[in-house]
Amino acid sequence: MSQLTELTITQALALLQSREISSIELTEAYLDRIGKFESQIKAFITLTPELALQQAQAADKLRQNNSDYQLPALLGLPIAIKDVLAIKDIRCTCGSRILEDFVPPYTATTVQRLLDAGVVVLGKTNTDEFAMGSSTENSAYQTTHNPWNLEHVPGGSSGGSAAAVTSHFAPVALGSDTGGSVRQPASFCGISGLKPTYGRVSRYGLIAYGSSLDSVGIFAHTAEEIALIFQHIAGRDPRDATSMEIPVPSISLSENTSLVGMRIGVPKEYFISGIQPEVDAAVRSAVSQMEALGAEIVEISLPHTEYALPVYYLIATAEASANLARYDGMRYGYSAESATLWQRFKDTRGSGFGSEVKRRIMLGTYALSAGYYNAYYGQAQKVRTLIKRDFEQAYEKVDAIATPVAPTTAFKIGEHTNDPLAMYLEDIFTLPTNLAGVPGLAFPVGFDNQGLPVGMQLMGPHFKEESLLKLVHAYQLSTSWHKVLPDL
């Protein structure tokens, strides 16, 4: 059974299609592995074994009865979903006590598209509360552990999804990325993670954090696997006004490793003092490998990078303040028992939200308050435009930009708990991508001297996910970092 959980998505689908294995067998193999190791990793908030086996049984029946017809492309493939994406009749907590018993009456578009393609849902994965965090320590339910070293964080906020894929609890998982929440945990856990272009994938059914920054992303072991899932979730959705009417390409990744004709930019602002030496060395080595495959390496500048951190923590917190105002204890979710209406509002939000969420709500409310709006939020939006222009000018010269994902490898659980700024700095290399709305793809490029994975990211022009996937696919064909597995 354990061997089934080590199949790639392509291998699993081929065996399902040929009926060498059934979806029931594959699903049971993942559920058995979860049962064996979940107490160590704590990747899931809610497991759905009964639903998964029902879906697997239905997939097997459909395949058996319709062998001559075009079947859904992902029929019978297990998947894990971050607990910020709504699935009808399955509780959606967002890692918060305030939504502990919330059961959505609808399903997120991305999840529905995968269900239509035939996937089997294993469960909902752990997350920092309302996706606010870089370590998955801010979950109201549990702290997820890094499969490479249980004393270290898996990254955040999509740490549960990253740890689930790394631990072979699922071959693929969905996450969300507002400031690096897919790419940073992918880096910390030694797998691949895609943040698509803003507007490329529907946000309908994704519980909002920062509406102009949020993206639904994908975790898998390789770029090839991500490409397969991406083609199913991307595309226009009339229920999300920000989703773009742009055709989704049929991405075909060849066995050709040549990168001749590709120009990769290396921004000097991302290789800074204070970066962990092993991270710097591994990323530079990966860039050299791409150069050896034929890519031209060009030094570039993204001069407004230094402002990305303060800009992000003004815009994101302002949007969070507005989005989280709906949790008032009156319509759905947790409601405190209090004597008066106003006291109920205060008690519900005071006890229902965790400390990090309350910190960001207060920061955002202050930035939006009368007398400070133009000085803080308004100014941040202007600098955001400058950051976006930096990327646009860079992409006139290069096809992709290569940088570290984070300045360090996975830090120890509790190491940054009492130092919010140190925690925020873990996302310093990923924030600009969200501010500019461009796609980013993280992938493993080595290990540090503690045996913890090092990740690199490639960022591309708007709607050029296919180019990033092809670049990383070529790199992964010529290296083996993505094949190294933790020993649970």
Image (tube, rainbow, N blue to C red):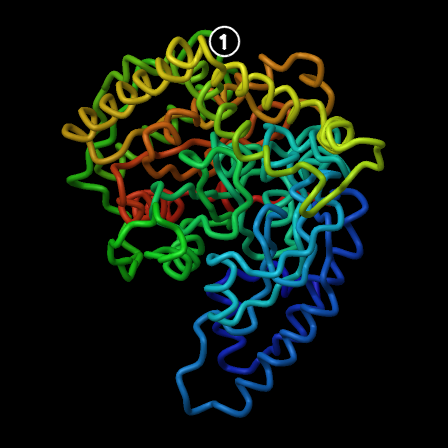
- Name the residue beneath numbered marker 1: 274
Q: Position of residue 238 (x, y in %)?
A: 36, 57
Q: Nearer the viewer, residue 362 or 56?
A: 362
Is the N terminus in the top left, top right, bottom left or bottom right quadrant? Answer: bottom right
Task: Report the side of 389 relative to 45 (left or right).
Answer: left
Classify 10 Å Cα crowding around label 1: few (below 14), some (14-19), many (20 and above).
Answer: few
- Amino acid type at circle 1 is Gly
Q: Nearer the viewer, residue 337 or 59?
A: 337
Residue at 15% x, 40% y is 261
Is the C terminus in the top left, top right, bottom left or bottom right quadrant? Answer: top right
Q: Nearer the viewer, residue 294 or 154?
A: 154
Residue at 21% x, 23% y is 298
In the rendered image, the vertical position of residue 475 relative to residue 405, given as above or below: below
How many numbered marks does the figure carry? 1
Q: Position of residue 144 (x, y in %)?
A: 71, 38
Q: Position of residue 196 (x, y in %)?
A: 38, 44
Residue at 69% x, 28% y is 152
